[in-house]
Image: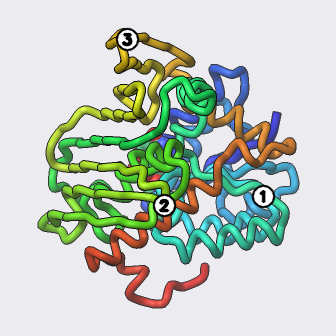
Amino acid sequence: MANWVSAGCGVIANELAQAMEKRGQKLYGVVNRTPEKAVAFAEKYGVQRVFTSFQDVCADPAVDIIYISTPHNTHIHFLRKALAAGKHVLCEKSITLNSEELEEAVQLAKEHGVVLAEAMTIYHMPIYKELKKRMDAGKFGELRVIQMNFGSYKEYDMKNRFFNRNLAGGALLDIGVYALSFVRMFLNSCPDQITSQVKLAPTGVDEQAGILLMNREQEMATVTLSLHAKQPKRGMISFDKAYVEMYEYPRGQKAVITYTEDGHTEEIVAGATADALGYEVEDMEQAIAGHPELMKLEFTEDVMKMMTRIRKDWGLTYPEEEHATEKI
Ligand SMILES: NC(=O)c1ccc[n+]([C@@H]2O[C@H](COP(=O)([O-])OP(=O)(O)OC[C@H]3O[C@@H](n4cnc5c(N)ncnc54)[C@H](OP(=O)(O)O)[C@@H]3O)[C@@H](O)[C@H]2O)c1
């Protein structure tokens, strides 16, 4: 198994460490802005090394994979250093702020021959691999339309990242990325026609949005997001002979299929929600061993293109996009 280092030790880094424990694996190292938290994290999960700087992580030849789990706007700084040092990277969603940053990272990864991937659970859940297999075998007929919801109720609290423009907050980058990744995974090509409506939060980031997408095959999708109203995490894929309903789709394990010719339903379960991050870790291990296609970087690039275009339509920028960023 590879030597992983976590850059960050917040909520999702804890989940990753627990997922690794479940696989009988431990993180090799951790580095964090607040070093005391890294020390406590290392003790909790039996992590061998606590690094005092990101430079030290990049300079350690024993490090294979760096897992980045800091706020969105900081990702590019870590990506630049890690990829230039020849480290494979699994980076939390949203992988960057925009396509320009992502393409810079993709070029660096190519130059240094390493795997770059976004930690998008949807691409690794067994239920989606099973659904895609059936879809590709023609079991559901032709794909027509996908409907996605995702709504969380978050307080207008500037201490967390959700509504904070300085931490690249907003519904699109935080939760829209899941809905669009689902859409991209099932549509036969990336949508090239996109319209949307947005309601901004008092902090200036996107609180609520409705997005309508269509690709060249005229397959359509609708996405409804909110960060200040709860909605079920529900996905529905309609074909001309069946529709598929998914709940809790970011880490989905169960799909209900209704075959519309006779109305009968079928429930399929594949994988387990509780193992979501474990599937991601497993695919990343295989990716660096010669199967980079498992990480679906091309979908990540398409989703980032869609989000960049949607924010451009809204005129919504982050401070880093308004000033030349320091290349740290
Ligand atoms: N895939 C998923 O299911 C999932 C779920 C949740 C989050 N995420 C993603 O994971 C990332 C982190 O989310 P989280 O909920 O784990 O956040 P969190 O609990 O707030 O943890 C954030 C981590 O980043 C560090 N950090 C904060 N600001 C930083 C800065 N300016 N420079 C360097 N480090 C900084 C924090 O260090 P300190 O200890 O010093 O504060 C902490 O270790 C986000 O990109 C988020 O979208 C993914």
Looking at the image, which residue is at 49% across and 67% down?
A: 305
| Mark 3 within 8 Å of ligand 1, using the beta carbon | no
- Quarter of the rendering containing residue 61: bottom right
Q: Rounded to the nearest whole Å, what is the CA distance between mark 1 and mark 2?
A: 37 Å
Viewer-side label of 1, 2: 2
- The 10 Å Cα crowd at callout 3, few under 14, some 14 to 19, many 20 or more, is some
- Quarter of the rendering containing residue 301: bottom right
Look at the picture and state if 27 lies above or below 87. Answer: above
Q: Amino acid at mark 2?
A: Arg
Q: Where does label 3 land, which residue?
A: 265
Q: Where does label 1 land, which residue?
A: 87
- Quarter of the rendering containing residue 78: bottom right
- Nearest the camera: 273 or 306? 306
Q: Does residue 272 appear to the left or right of 4 in the view shown?
A: left
Residue 132 position, x and y percent, is 58, 32
Q: Does residue 9 appear to the left or right of 223 in the view shown?
A: right
Q: Amino acid at mark 1?
A: Lys
Specify whether residue 17 is in view. Answer: no
Looking at the image, which residue is at 86% across and 42% down?
A: 289
Considering every residue shown, the one lying at the far bottom of the view is 324
Q: Rounded to the nearest whole Å, what is the CA distance between mark 3 and mark 1?
A: 46 Å
Residue 311 position, x and y percent, is 33, 71
In the rendering, which numbered label is found on residue 23?
A: none
Question: Split into 4 quadrants, where in the image is the N terminus?
Answer: top right
Viewer-side label of 3, 2: 2
Residue 258 position, x and y percent, is 36, 18
Looking at the image, which residue is at 50% across and 84% down?
A: 325
Q: Rounded to the nearest whole Å, what is the CA distance between mark 3 and mark 2?
A: 31 Å
Q: Where does label 2 land, which residue?
A: 216
Look at the picture and state if 283 lies above or below 315. Answer: above
- The 10 Å Cα crowd at callout 1, few under 14, some 14 to 19, many 20 or more, is many
